[in-house]
Amino acid sequence: MPTIHLIISGGIAAYKALELIRRLRDAGWRVVPVMTRSAAHFVTPLSVAALAGEKVYGDLFSLTDEAEMGHIRLARDADLIVVAPATANIMAKMAHGEADDLATAVLLATDRPVLLAPAMNPHMWDHVATRENVKTLAARGMHFVGPNGGDMACGEVGTGRMAEVPDILAAIEKISGARPLAGKTAIVTAGATQEPIDPVRFITNGSSGRQGVAIAKALARAGAKVTLIHGVMQVDAPVGMNAIFARTADEMWTAVQQVLPADIFIGAAAVADYAPVEIAGQKIKKSGEEMTITLRPTVDILKSVGNHTRRPKLVIGFALETESHFENAQAKLAAKKSDWILINDVSAMHAEDNKITLLSSAKNIEWPAISKDSVARMITEEIVNHFARGEP
Ligand code: CTP
């Protein structure tokens, strides 16, 4: 997973680091936070850890972390190091090669690109010492975003406000480079639909939505404009992504039609194949007798997309199978006019990992059991290759 080490140094703008973490994770980044001691005066390590979903690193001499990782590895593991906010103090230390805490040690040991988002009082920013430090760091190839002008928290007016989160994200995207799916649009369905029987009962399938969300994020990371159309999920839809909730198969199909056309369609949703013909207006009382619910087939969304006049260039479906995986998937590939079918075994449904085979008319790729995020990355890579090769 692409990883950013986010160094939070001690300034009032440190609170914006929380929003930055959320947005980075939504964009598919893993964020490993490193806090300086003074940063902890402005934001709590607990909230940083909760948002990052990672432990917060801070102590250079923590024996367990040294054993687990070591600050040199921490410095080299990342794709990118972001310092936000970057105080005058941490920039001065960087300019002079000081390494008296984990944050500065990481910055001294790293060979990864570094992006700084300075934030400080305007007089500190204007001071010749800071100016020279910035010049030194820029000459060494460090990237900068901001600071901006305007009212400062300290009551003064001038340049020193940390760049806004969207600007920092844009700078990160620019530095991290390749957005191979930029300009492409994608629709991803995820989660389980619910087909109501009465106001409290419904028919559904087991699906957490995790794999679909991971794919949506990975496509977004690669630059695609993604719409996530989802039923009920055990995970949140990524903040900042265009997400549409659709409870039933019919609602999901309506939403898909509204969003079409798109370049890519991925049907990761567990759509209920049948829905009750009648939905009782009141809760059905138990009678003690056997009862029968008459079901009608729902719309097959993947098949309808495959046959649509505005058919996406690449239509991808899943095949969740318990037996004869390959034969069943082959049949689905043809029946649903899909370009690829991703076969997954039912055992993956509630598991952390997923074992997928990609089946197309031309090839078949079998991946080992890997995390759902890794599956999403592999699929995205295949999609990127597909468009790069100019395949029909
Ligand atoms: N799918 C869909 N609409 C439906 C049913 C399924 O879009 N009404 C999509 C799923 O999102 C998935 C693919 O079709 O991408 C295959 O789903 P799966 O449950 O494996 O197959 P079914 O078509 O339901 O066939 P069966 O139940 O016979 O295996």
Image (cartoon, helix red, strand yellow):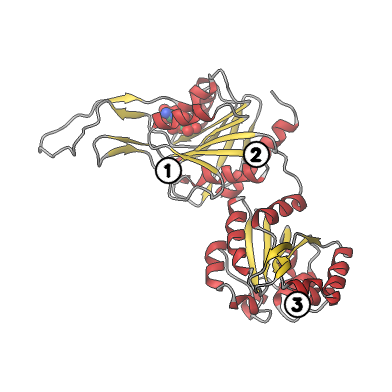
What residue is disc 1 on? 207
Viewer-nearest residue: 52 or 360: 52
Tell which tag, 2 or 1, sits nearer the viewer: 2
> Residue at label 2?
224
Determine whether label 1 and label 3 are within 8 Å by CB: no
Identify the amino acid type marked 1: Ser
Give the image quarter of residue 152: bottom right
Find out whether the residues at labels 2 and 1 contact each other: C-beta distance under 8 Å: no
Query: Mark 3 near ligand 1 (CB under 8 Å)?
Result: no
> Gap in Å between the C-alphas at discs 1 and 3?
49 Å
Q: In which quarter of the image is the C terminus?
A: top right
* Spatial CA span between label 2 and label 1: 24 Å
Q: Residues within 10 Å of mark 1 (few under 14, many from 20)?
A: many
| 133 up-or-down from 192: above or below | below
How far apart marks 3 and 2 lie (CA) works out to: 38 Å
Q: Is 212 on the left or on the right of 136, as rendered?
A: left
**Residue shown at 24%/39% (left/top)?**
199
Asked if marks 3 and 2 touch (Cβ < 8 Å), the reply is no
Mark 2 surroundings within 10 Å by alpha-carbon count, few (fewer than 14), some (14 through 19), many (20 or more):
many
